[in-house]
Amino acid sequence: MEADGSAGLAKSAALKLSEMGERTKQLGSAMQDPKRKRRLILVIVCVALLLDNMLYMVIVPIIPDYLADLESEQAARAHANSSLGRANRDNLDIQIGVLFASKAILQLMVNPLSGTFIDRVGYDIPLLIGLLVMFVSTCIFAFANNYGTLFAARSLQGLGSAFADTSGIAMIADKYTEEAERSRALGIALAFISFGSLVAPPFGSILYEFAGKRVPFIVLASVCLADGILLLTVIKPFSNRTRENMPVGTPIYRLMMDPYIAVVAGALTVCNIPLAFLEPTIANWMENTMNATKWEMGLIWLPAFLPHVLGVYITVRLAAKYPELQWFYGALGMVIIGASSCTVPACKTFGQLMLPLCGICFGIALVDTALLPTLAFLVDVRHVSVYGSVYAIADISYSVAYAMGPIVAGQIVHNLGFVQLNLGMGLVNVLYAPALLLLRCVCQVKPSNSERNVLLEEGATGLYDTIRMEERKLKRKGLCGAGAESRTLSAAEDRRRAAGETDA
Protein backbone atom coordinates (compact mmCIF):
# COMPACT_ATOMS: atom_id res chain seq x y z
CA MET A 1 0.00 0.00 0.00
CA GLU A 2 2.78 2.39 0.96
CA ALA A 3 4.76 1.31 -2.11
CA ASP A 4 1.79 2.09 -4.36
CA GLY A 5 1.43 5.52 -2.73
CA SER A 6 5.11 6.38 -3.14
CA ALA A 7 5.03 5.15 -6.74
CA GLY A 8 2.02 7.40 -7.40
CA LEU A 9 3.79 10.39 -5.86
CA ALA A 10 6.89 9.72 -7.92
CA LYS A 11 4.79 9.43 -11.08
CA SER A 12 2.96 12.70 -10.39
CA ALA A 13 6.26 14.46 -9.63
CA ALA A 14 7.72 13.17 -12.89
CA LEU A 15 4.65 14.40 -14.77
CA LYS A 16 4.96 17.85 -13.18
CA LEU A 17 8.66 18.01 -14.02
CA SER A 18 7.95 17.04 -17.62
CA GLU A 19 5.23 19.69 -17.82
CA MET A 20 7.63 22.28 -16.44
CA GLY A 21 10.23 21.20 -18.99
CA GLU A 22 7.72 21.54 -21.81
CA ARG A 23 6.70 25.00 -20.60
CA THR A 24 10.35 26.02 -20.37
CA LYS A 25 10.92 24.82 -23.93
CA GLN A 26 7.83 26.69 -25.11
CA LEU A 27 9.00 29.83 -23.34
CA GLY A 28 12.45 29.47 -24.88
CA SER A 29 11.06 28.95 -28.36
CA ALA A 30 8.68 31.89 -27.88
CA MET A 31 11.59 34.11 -26.83
CA GLN A 32 13.50 33.06 -29.96
CA ASP A 33 10.58 33.95 -32.23
CA PRO A 34 11.85 37.00 -34.20
CA LYS A 35 8.79 39.18 -33.63
CA ARG A 36 8.50 38.41 -29.92
CA LYS A 37 12.22 38.75 -29.42
CA ARG A 38 12.15 42.13 -31.12
CA ARG A 39 9.35 43.25 -28.80
CA LEU A 40 11.29 42.04 -25.76
CA ILE A 41 14.34 43.97 -26.97
CA LEU A 42 12.16 47.07 -27.29
CA VAL A 43 10.93 46.55 -23.71
CA ILE A 44 14.51 46.16 -22.42
CA VAL A 45 15.67 49.31 -24.20
CA CYS A 46 12.63 51.32 -23.08
CA VAL A 47 13.20 50.33 -19.44
CA ALA A 48 16.88 51.30 -19.74
CA LEU A 49 15.93 54.72 -21.16
CA LEU A 50 13.25 55.15 -18.48
CA LEU A 51 15.78 54.39 -15.73
CA ASP A 52 18.40 56.72 -17.17
CA ASN A 53 16.02 59.67 -17.30
CA MET A 54 14.56 58.91 -13.88
CA LEU A 55 18.09 58.86 -12.45
CA TYR A 56 18.79 62.15 -14.22
CA MET A 57 15.75 63.91 -12.75
CA VAL A 58 15.13 62.12 -9.44
CA ILE A 59 17.91 64.10 -7.76
CA VAL A 60 16.25 67.44 -8.60
CA PRO A 61 14.08 67.56 -5.42
CA ILE A 62 16.47 65.50 -3.28
CA ILE A 63 20.00 66.83 -3.70
CA PRO A 64 19.45 70.57 -2.98
CA ASP A 65 17.75 69.81 0.32
CA TYR A 66 20.23 67.08 1.19
CA LEU A 67 23.25 69.28 0.42
CA ALA A 68 21.68 72.16 2.37
CA ASP A 69 21.38 69.88 5.41
CA LEU A 70 25.03 68.84 5.05
CA GLU A 71 26.03 72.50 4.73
CA SER A 72 24.01 73.41 7.82
CA GLU A 73 25.69 70.69 9.84
CA GLN A 74 29.14 71.91 8.80
CA ALA A 75 28.19 75.53 9.55
CA ALA A 76 26.86 74.54 12.97
CA ARG A 77 30.10 72.78 13.78
CA ALA A 78 32.12 75.81 12.66
CA HIS A 79 29.79 78.33 14.40
CA ALA A 80 29.59 80.35 11.13
CA ASN A 81 28.35 83.92 11.19
CA SER A 82 25.64 85.32 8.87
CA SER A 83 28.04 86.64 6.21
CA LEU A 84 29.70 83.24 6.04
CA GLY A 85 26.23 81.67 5.77
CA ARG A 86 25.43 83.80 2.70
CA ALA A 87 28.76 82.82 1.15
CA ASN A 88 28.00 79.18 1.85
CA ARG A 89 24.61 79.61 0.19
CA ASP A 90 26.22 81.01 -2.97
CA ASN A 91 28.77 78.22 -2.91
CA LEU A 92 25.93 75.70 -2.53
CA ASP A 93 24.18 77.02 -5.64
CA ILE A 94 27.39 76.61 -7.64
CA GLN A 95 27.87 73.09 -6.27
CA ILE A 96 24.33 72.09 -7.25
CA GLY A 97 24.75 73.49 -10.76
CA VAL A 98 28.05 71.68 -11.29
CA LEU A 99 26.63 68.44 -9.88
CA PHE A 100 23.60 68.56 -12.18
CA ALA A 101 25.76 69.33 -15.23
CA SER A 102 28.50 66.76 -14.53
CA LYS A 103 26.46 63.88 -15.94
CA ALA A 104 25.85 65.59 -19.29
CA ILE A 105 29.45 66.87 -19.48
CA LEU A 106 30.98 63.40 -19.04
CA GLN A 107 28.37 61.93 -21.40
CA LEU A 108 29.35 64.55 -23.96
CA MET A 109 33.02 63.60 -23.63
CA VAL A 110 32.48 59.82 -23.78
CA ASN A 111 29.90 59.69 -26.61
CA PRO A 112 32.37 59.89 -29.54
CA LEU A 113 34.24 56.91 -28.07
CA SER A 114 31.12 54.95 -27.15
CA GLY A 115 29.64 55.41 -30.65
CA THR A 116 32.77 53.98 -32.27
CA PHE A 117 32.88 51.14 -29.73
CA ILE A 118 29.23 50.26 -30.45
CA ASP A 119 29.91 50.20 -34.19
CA ARG A 120 32.76 47.75 -33.61
CA VAL A 121 31.23 45.26 -31.15
CA GLY A 122 27.47 45.55 -31.73
CA TYR A 123 24.66 46.93 -29.59
CA ASP A 124 24.07 44.31 -26.88
CA ILE A 125 27.36 44.35 -24.94
CA PRO A 126 27.49 48.19 -24.72
CA LEU A 127 23.87 48.18 -23.48
CA LEU A 128 24.82 45.68 -20.77
CA ILE A 129 27.87 47.78 -19.84
CA GLY A 130 25.67 50.87 -19.59
CA LEU A 131 23.14 49.12 -17.33
CA LEU A 132 25.88 47.80 -15.04
CA VAL A 133 27.51 51.24 -14.72
CA MET A 134 24.12 52.84 -14.04
CA PHE A 135 23.44 50.21 -11.36
CA VAL A 136 26.76 50.95 -9.64
CA SER A 137 26.24 54.73 -9.81
CA THR A 138 22.71 54.41 -8.37
CA CYS A 139 24.00 52.34 -5.46
CA ILE A 140 26.69 54.96 -4.80
CA PHE A 141 24.00 57.67 -4.80
CA ALA A 142 21.99 55.69 -2.23
CA PHE A 143 24.85 55.51 0.28
CA ALA A 144 26.79 58.71 -0.48
CA ASN A 145 27.13 61.10 2.47
CA ASN A 146 29.30 63.91 1.05
CA TYR A 147 29.51 66.10 -2.04
CA GLY A 148 32.56 64.36 -3.52
CA THR A 149 30.86 60.95 -3.54
CA LEU A 150 27.68 62.43 -5.03
CA PHE A 151 29.75 64.08 -7.78
CA ALA A 152 31.49 60.78 -8.56
CA ALA A 153 28.14 58.96 -8.73
CA ARG A 154 26.63 61.61 -11.00
CA SER A 155 29.63 61.53 -13.35
CA LEU A 156 29.58 57.73 -13.40
CA GLN A 157 25.94 57.89 -14.43
CA GLY A 158 26.98 59.96 -17.45
CA LEU A 159 29.41 57.21 -18.44
CA GLY A 160 26.64 54.61 -18.22
CA SER A 161 24.23 56.79 -20.18
CA ALA A 162 26.75 57.26 -23.00
CA PHE A 163 26.67 53.49 -23.55
CA ALA A 164 23.08 52.60 -22.62
CA ASP A 165 21.24 55.43 -24.41
CA THR A 166 23.26 55.28 -27.62
CA SER A 167 23.32 51.49 -27.95
CA GLY A 168 19.64 51.18 -27.00
CA ILE A 169 18.35 53.63 -29.61
CA ALA A 170 20.77 52.25 -32.21
CA MET A 171 19.52 48.73 -31.47
CA ILE A 172 15.93 49.81 -32.09
CA ALA A 173 16.94 51.39 -35.40
CA ASP A 174 18.77 48.20 -36.38
CA LYS A 175 15.97 45.79 -35.44
CA TYR A 176 13.17 47.84 -37.01
CA THR A 177 14.27 48.36 -40.61
CA GLU A 178 10.96 49.51 -42.10
CA GLU A 179 10.42 53.26 -41.77
CA ALA A 180 6.91 53.07 -40.28
CA GLU A 181 7.92 50.40 -37.74
CA ARG A 182 11.08 52.28 -36.86
CA SER A 183 9.18 55.52 -36.25
CA ARG A 184 6.66 53.68 -34.07
CA ALA A 185 9.35 51.91 -32.02
CA LEU A 186 11.40 55.08 -31.53
CA GLY A 187 8.21 56.92 -30.60
CA ILE A 188 7.54 54.37 -27.85
CA ALA A 189 11.11 54.82 -26.60
CA LEU A 190 10.66 58.60 -26.56
CA ALA A 191 7.45 58.20 -24.55
CA PHE A 192 9.41 56.25 -21.92
CA ILE A 193 12.11 58.94 -21.91
CA SER A 194 9.48 61.60 -21.33
CA PHE A 195 7.73 59.59 -18.64
CA GLY A 196 11.00 59.02 -16.80
CA SER A 197 11.96 62.69 -16.90
CA LEU A 198 8.56 63.99 -15.79
CA VAL A 199 7.57 61.41 -13.16
CA ALA A 200 10.99 61.28 -11.46
CA PRO A 201 10.76 64.56 -9.46
CA PRO A 202 7.46 63.70 -7.70
CA PHE A 203 8.61 60.06 -7.31
CA GLY A 204 11.85 61.20 -5.69
CA SER A 205 10.32 63.91 -3.51
CA ILE A 206 7.59 61.64 -2.10
CA LEU A 207 9.93 58.76 -1.26
CA TYR A 208 12.57 61.18 0.08
CA GLU A 209 9.99 62.84 2.33
CA PHE A 210 8.53 59.65 3.80
CA ALA A 211 11.27 57.01 3.44
CA GLY A 212 14.59 58.87 3.31
CA LYS A 213 17.26 59.52 0.71
CA ARG A 214 18.29 55.94 0.05
CA VAL A 215 14.93 54.41 -0.88
CA PRO A 216 14.38 56.08 -4.30
CA PHE A 217 17.84 55.04 -5.45
CA ILE A 218 17.52 51.49 -4.10
CA VAL A 219 14.23 51.07 -6.02
CA LEU A 220 15.79 52.32 -9.25
CA ALA A 221 18.91 50.17 -8.74
CA SER A 222 16.72 47.07 -8.31
CA VAL A 223 14.86 47.78 -11.56
CA CYS A 224 18.17 48.40 -13.33
CA LEU A 225 19.52 45.04 -12.13
CA ALA A 226 16.35 43.26 -13.26
CA ASP A 227 16.61 44.86 -16.71
CA GLY A 228 20.22 43.70 -17.02
CA ILE A 229 19.25 40.13 -16.11
CA LEU A 230 16.46 40.22 -18.70
CA LEU A 231 18.98 41.44 -21.29
CA LEU A 232 21.29 38.51 -20.51
CA THR A 233 18.35 36.09 -20.77
CA VAL A 234 16.82 37.35 -24.01
CA ILE A 235 19.75 38.57 -26.11
CA LYS A 236 22.62 36.50 -24.62
CA PRO A 237 25.23 39.06 -25.68
CA PHE A 238 28.28 36.89 -25.02
CA SER A 239 27.00 34.05 -27.20
CA ASN A 240 25.90 36.22 -30.12
CA ARG A 241 28.15 35.59 -33.12
CA THR A 242 26.53 38.03 -35.54
CA ARG A 243 28.98 40.81 -34.64
CA GLU A 244 31.77 38.87 -36.34
CA ASN A 245 30.17 39.64 -39.72
CA MET A 246 29.18 43.23 -38.93
CA PRO A 247 30.27 45.76 -41.54
CA VAL A 248 32.54 48.60 -40.50
CA GLY A 249 30.45 51.67 -39.77
CA THR A 250 31.19 55.16 -41.05
CA PRO A 251 33.55 57.02 -38.66
CA ILE A 252 31.81 59.52 -36.43
CA TYR A 253 33.83 62.48 -37.71
CA ARG A 254 32.63 61.78 -41.27
CA LEU A 255 29.04 61.59 -40.06
CA MET A 256 29.46 64.92 -38.30
CA MET A 257 30.58 66.49 -41.58
CA ASP A 258 27.45 65.28 -43.37
CA PRO A 259 25.37 68.48 -43.80
CA TYR A 260 22.03 66.70 -43.38
CA ILE A 261 23.10 64.98 -40.16
CA ALA A 262 24.56 68.28 -38.90
CA VAL A 263 21.22 70.03 -39.49
CA VAL A 264 19.35 67.30 -37.56
CA ALA A 265 21.88 67.38 -34.70
CA GLY A 266 21.56 71.16 -34.44
CA ALA A 267 17.78 70.93 -34.32
CA LEU A 268 17.92 68.33 -31.51
CA THR A 269 20.18 70.64 -29.48
CA VAL A 270 18.16 73.81 -30.05
CA CYS A 271 14.77 72.24 -29.35
CA ASN A 272 15.96 70.84 -26.00
CA ILE A 273 17.51 74.11 -24.79
CA PRO A 274 14.21 75.50 -23.34
CA LEU A 275 13.63 72.34 -21.29
CA ALA A 276 17.26 72.14 -20.17
CA PHE A 277 17.40 75.84 -19.22
CA LEU A 278 14.00 76.01 -17.51
CA GLU A 279 14.45 72.96 -15.28
CA PRO A 280 17.08 74.61 -13.01
CA THR A 281 15.55 78.12 -13.08
CA ILE A 282 11.77 77.86 -13.12
CA ALA A 283 11.37 76.82 -9.47
CA ASN A 284 13.00 80.01 -8.13
CA TRP A 285 11.03 82.13 -10.60
CA MET A 286 7.76 80.47 -9.50
CA GLU A 287 8.61 81.10 -5.85
CA ASN A 288 9.44 84.76 -6.47
CA THR A 289 6.59 85.68 -8.84
CA MET A 290 3.63 83.51 -7.79
CA ASN A 291 4.60 82.37 -4.27
CA ALA A 292 4.43 78.74 -5.44
CA THR A 293 4.49 75.96 -2.86
CA LYS A 294 6.96 73.08 -2.85
CA TRP A 295 4.45 70.64 -4.33
CA GLU A 296 3.60 73.07 -7.13
CA MET A 297 7.27 73.45 -8.02
CA GLY A 298 7.68 69.67 -7.97
CA LEU A 299 4.59 68.87 -10.07
CA ILE A 300 4.73 71.67 -12.63
CA TRP A 301 6.27 69.40 -15.31
CA LEU A 302 4.10 66.35 -14.68
CA PRO A 303 1.02 67.46 -16.73
CA ALA A 304 3.33 67.97 -19.74
CA PHE A 305 3.68 64.17 -20.07
CA LEU A 306 0.27 63.85 -21.76
CA PRO A 307 0.94 66.39 -24.57
CA HIS A 308 4.37 64.81 -25.08
CA VAL A 309 2.80 61.39 -25.62
CA LEU A 310 0.14 63.01 -27.83
CA GLY A 311 2.87 64.63 -29.92
CA VAL A 312 4.65 61.30 -30.32
CA TYR A 313 1.40 59.58 -31.36
CA ILE A 314 0.44 62.28 -33.87
CA THR A 315 3.91 62.35 -35.46
CA VAL A 316 4.07 58.55 -35.78
CA ARG A 317 0.65 58.45 -37.45
CA LEU A 318 1.47 61.30 -39.81
CA ALA A 319 4.89 59.85 -40.65
CA ALA A 320 3.24 56.55 -41.62
CA LYS A 321 0.94 58.33 -44.09
CA TYR A 322 3.19 61.18 -45.25
CA PRO A 323 6.82 60.13 -44.64
CA GLU A 324 8.12 62.78 -47.02
CA LEU A 325 7.04 65.52 -44.56
CA GLN A 326 9.26 64.53 -41.64
CA TRP A 327 11.21 67.78 -42.02
CA PHE A 328 7.95 69.75 -41.76
CA TYR A 329 6.89 68.02 -38.52
CA GLY A 330 10.26 68.93 -36.99
CA ALA A 331 10.06 72.55 -38.16
CA LEU A 332 6.50 72.88 -36.86
CA GLY A 333 7.62 71.50 -33.50
CA MET A 334 10.39 74.10 -33.25
CA VAL A 335 7.95 76.92 -33.98
CA ILE A 336 5.60 75.62 -31.26
CA ILE A 337 8.53 75.41 -28.81
CA GLY A 338 9.56 78.96 -29.65
CA ALA A 339 6.07 80.42 -29.23
CA SER A 340 5.51 78.52 -25.96
CA SER A 341 8.86 79.59 -24.52
CA CYS A 342 8.11 83.25 -25.20
CA THR A 343 4.80 83.04 -23.29
CA VAL A 344 6.26 81.49 -20.11
CA PRO A 345 7.18 84.85 -18.42
CA ALA A 346 3.65 86.19 -18.97
CA CYS A 347 2.11 83.49 -16.74
CA LYS A 348 0.92 84.60 -13.31
CA THR A 349 -0.57 81.40 -11.85
CA PHE A 350 0.22 77.71 -11.66
CA GLY A 351 -2.59 76.85 -14.08
CA GLN A 352 -1.46 79.40 -16.64
CA LEU A 353 2.13 78.16 -16.50
CA MET A 354 1.10 74.59 -17.31
CA LEU A 355 -0.06 75.61 -20.82
CA PRO A 356 3.25 76.88 -22.27
CA LEU A 357 5.18 74.05 -20.59
CA CYS A 358 2.80 71.56 -22.21
CA GLY A 359 3.39 73.38 -25.52
CA ILE A 360 7.18 73.05 -25.10
CA CYS A 361 6.95 69.30 -24.43
CA PHE A 362 4.49 68.82 -27.31
CA GLY A 363 6.90 70.58 -29.68
CA ILE A 364 9.88 68.55 -28.42
CA ALA A 365 7.88 65.37 -29.10
CA LEU A 366 7.27 66.49 -32.69
CA VAL A 367 10.95 67.27 -33.28
CA ASP A 368 12.40 64.15 -31.64
CA THR A 369 9.88 61.72 -33.13
CA ALA A 370 10.38 63.14 -36.63
CA LEU A 371 14.17 63.55 -36.59
CA LEU A 372 15.48 60.50 -34.71
CA PRO A 373 14.23 58.07 -37.42
CA THR A 374 15.53 60.52 -40.03
CA LEU A 375 19.07 60.03 -38.65
CA ALA A 376 18.85 56.28 -39.24
CA PHE A 377 17.41 56.91 -42.70
CA LEU A 378 20.27 59.26 -43.59
CA VAL A 379 22.79 56.63 -42.54
CA ASP A 380 20.96 54.01 -44.61
CA VAL A 381 21.05 56.03 -47.82
CA ARG A 382 24.30 57.99 -47.50
CA HIS A 383 26.57 55.77 -45.38
CA VAL A 384 26.78 52.22 -43.98
CA SER A 385 23.73 51.00 -42.04
CA VAL A 386 25.46 50.82 -38.67
CA TYR A 387 23.84 53.17 -36.17
CA GLY A 388 26.08 53.49 -33.12
CA SER A 389 27.96 56.61 -34.21
CA VAL A 390 24.96 58.48 -35.62
CA TYR A 391 22.98 58.04 -32.40
CA ALA A 392 26.09 58.99 -30.43
CA ILE A 393 25.84 62.29 -32.34
CA ALA A 394 22.18 62.56 -31.29
CA ASP A 395 23.19 61.90 -27.67
CA ILE A 396 25.89 64.56 -27.98
CA SER A 397 23.23 67.00 -29.18
CA TYR A 398 21.10 66.36 -26.08
CA SER A 399 24.14 66.47 -23.80
CA VAL A 400 25.21 69.89 -25.10
CA ALA A 401 21.85 71.37 -24.09
CA TYR A 402 21.73 69.67 -20.68
CA ALA A 403 25.38 70.38 -19.89
CA MET A 404 24.88 74.11 -20.48
CA GLY A 405 21.50 74.30 -18.71
CA PRO A 406 22.44 74.06 -15.01
CA ILE A 407 25.54 76.27 -15.46
CA VAL A 408 24.61 78.85 -18.12
CA ALA A 409 20.89 79.35 -17.40
CA GLY A 410 21.42 80.65 -13.87
CA GLN A 411 24.02 83.16 -15.06
CA ILE A 412 21.70 84.43 -17.82
CA VAL A 413 18.85 84.88 -15.34
CA HIS A 414 21.16 86.66 -12.92
CA ASN A 415 22.65 89.03 -15.52
CA LEU A 416 19.76 89.56 -17.98
CA GLY A 417 16.61 88.26 -16.33
CA PHE A 418 14.15 85.38 -16.69
CA VAL A 419 12.11 87.16 -19.36
CA GLN A 420 15.12 87.68 -21.62
CA LEU A 421 16.15 84.04 -21.17
CA ASN A 422 12.80 82.77 -22.45
CA LEU A 423 12.56 85.27 -25.29
CA GLY A 424 16.06 84.31 -26.43
CA MET A 425 15.28 80.58 -26.35
CA GLY A 426 12.04 81.09 -28.24
CA LEU A 427 13.70 83.25 -30.89
CA VAL A 428 16.49 80.72 -31.45
CA ASN A 429 13.97 77.92 -32.05
CA VAL A 430 11.87 79.95 -34.48
CA LEU A 431 14.94 81.12 -36.42
CA TYR A 432 16.38 77.58 -36.66
CA ALA A 433 13.16 76.01 -37.97
CA PRO A 434 13.73 77.07 -41.63
CA ALA A 435 17.07 75.20 -41.62
CA LEU A 436 15.09 71.94 -41.72
CA LEU A 437 14.04 72.87 -45.26
CA LEU A 438 17.43 71.43 -46.28
CA LEU A 439 16.03 67.97 -45.46
CA ARG A 440 13.12 68.40 -47.87
CA CYS A 441 15.01 67.09 -50.90
CA VAL A 442 15.97 63.95 -48.96
CA CYS A 443 12.58 63.31 -47.38
CA GLN A 444 10.59 63.84 -50.58
CA VAL A 445 12.27 60.95 -52.36
CA LYS A 446 11.88 58.68 -49.35
CA PRO A 447 9.67 55.67 -50.07
CA SER A 448 7.83 53.70 -47.43
CA ASN A 449 10.70 51.20 -47.26
CA SER A 450 14.17 52.68 -47.31
CA GLU A 451 16.04 50.47 -49.76
CA ARG A 452 19.13 51.96 -51.23
CA ASN A 453 18.57 50.90 -54.83
CA VAL A 454 15.15 52.57 -54.96
CA LEU A 455 16.33 55.79 -53.34
CA LEU A 456 19.33 56.23 -55.61
CA GLU A 457 17.54 54.72 -58.63
CA GLU A 458 20.32 52.20 -59.04
CA GLY A 459 21.18 48.70 -58.04
CA ALA A 460 23.10 47.65 -54.97
CA THR A 461 26.62 49.06 -54.99
CA GLY A 462 28.28 46.33 -52.98
CA LEU A 463 27.98 42.98 -51.31
CA TYR A 464 26.75 44.50 -48.04
CA ASP A 465 23.96 46.47 -49.75
CA THR A 466 22.85 43.33 -51.60
CA ILE A 467 22.73 41.30 -48.40
CA ARG A 468 20.79 44.01 -46.54
CA MET A 469 18.23 44.36 -49.33
CA GLU A 470 17.58 40.66 -49.65
CA GLU A 471 17.42 40.16 -45.89
CA ARG A 472 14.76 42.90 -45.69
CA LYS A 473 12.75 41.25 -48.46
CA LEU A 474 12.92 37.91 -46.62
CA LYS A 475 11.95 39.58 -43.34
CA ARG A 476 8.83 41.00 -44.93
CA LYS A 477 7.97 37.47 -46.13
CA GLY A 478 8.77 35.98 -42.70
CA LEU A 479 11.62 33.84 -44.08
CA CYS A 480 14.67 35.49 -42.57
CA GLY A 481 16.07 32.71 -40.40
CA ALA A 482 19.63 31.50 -40.14
CA GLY A 483 19.27 29.35 -43.25
CA ALA A 484 17.76 32.20 -45.22
CA GLU A 485 20.61 34.49 -44.24
CA SER A 486 23.21 31.96 -45.41
CA ARG A 487 21.35 31.44 -48.68
CA THR A 488 21.22 35.23 -49.14
CA LEU A 489 24.96 35.47 -48.54
CA SER A 490 25.81 32.69 -50.99
CA ALA A 491 23.46 34.10 -53.63
CA ALA A 492 25.02 37.53 -53.27
CA GLU A 493 28.50 36.02 -53.59
CA ASP A 494 27.46 34.14 -56.74
CA ARG A 495 26.09 37.34 -58.28
CA ARG A 496 29.26 39.24 -57.43
CA ARG A 497 31.46 36.54 -59.02
CA ALA A 498 29.24 36.43 -62.09
CA ALA A 499 29.46 40.21 -62.40
CA GLY A 500 33.24 39.98 -62.13
CA GLU A 501 33.44 37.30 -64.83
CA THR A 502 31.21 39.39 -67.13
CA ASP A 503 33.42 42.43 -66.65
CA ALA A 504 36.50 40.34 -67.35
Image (tube, rainbow, N blue to C red):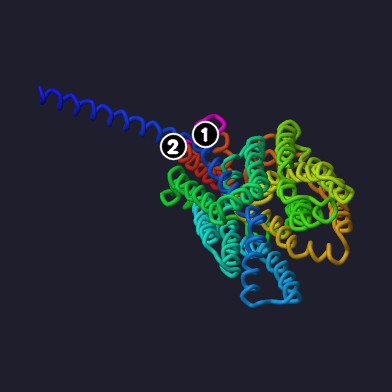
Which residue is the site of mark 1?
35
Do the residues bearing badges 2 and 1 touch, measured as CB atoms within 8 Å?
no
Where residue 409 appears, x then y in whole percent? Answer: 79, 61
Q: The disc labelled 2 sits on which kind of residue?
A: Gly
**Vertical arrangement, residue 186 with respect to residue 10, above or below:** below
**Vertical arrangement, residue 23 with respect to residue 145, above or below:** above
In the image, taking residue 171 as reference, residue 457 lies left or right, namely right
Residue 480, magenta (yes or no): yes
Where residue 472 appears, x then y in whole percent? Answer: 57, 37
**Vertical arrangement, residue 405 with respect to residue 89, above or below:** above
Task: Say which residue appears at 62% left-offset and 67% top-offset.
Answer: 70
Q: The disc labelled 1 sits on which kind of residue?
A: Lys
- Dot 2 falls on a residue whose secondary structure is helix
Is residue 74 in view from this perspective? yes
Task: Say which residue appears at 70% left-offset and 38% top-offset.
Answer: 309
Is residue 440 in view from this perspective? no
Which residue is the site of mark 2?
483
**Residues in magenta, as a range:** 475-482
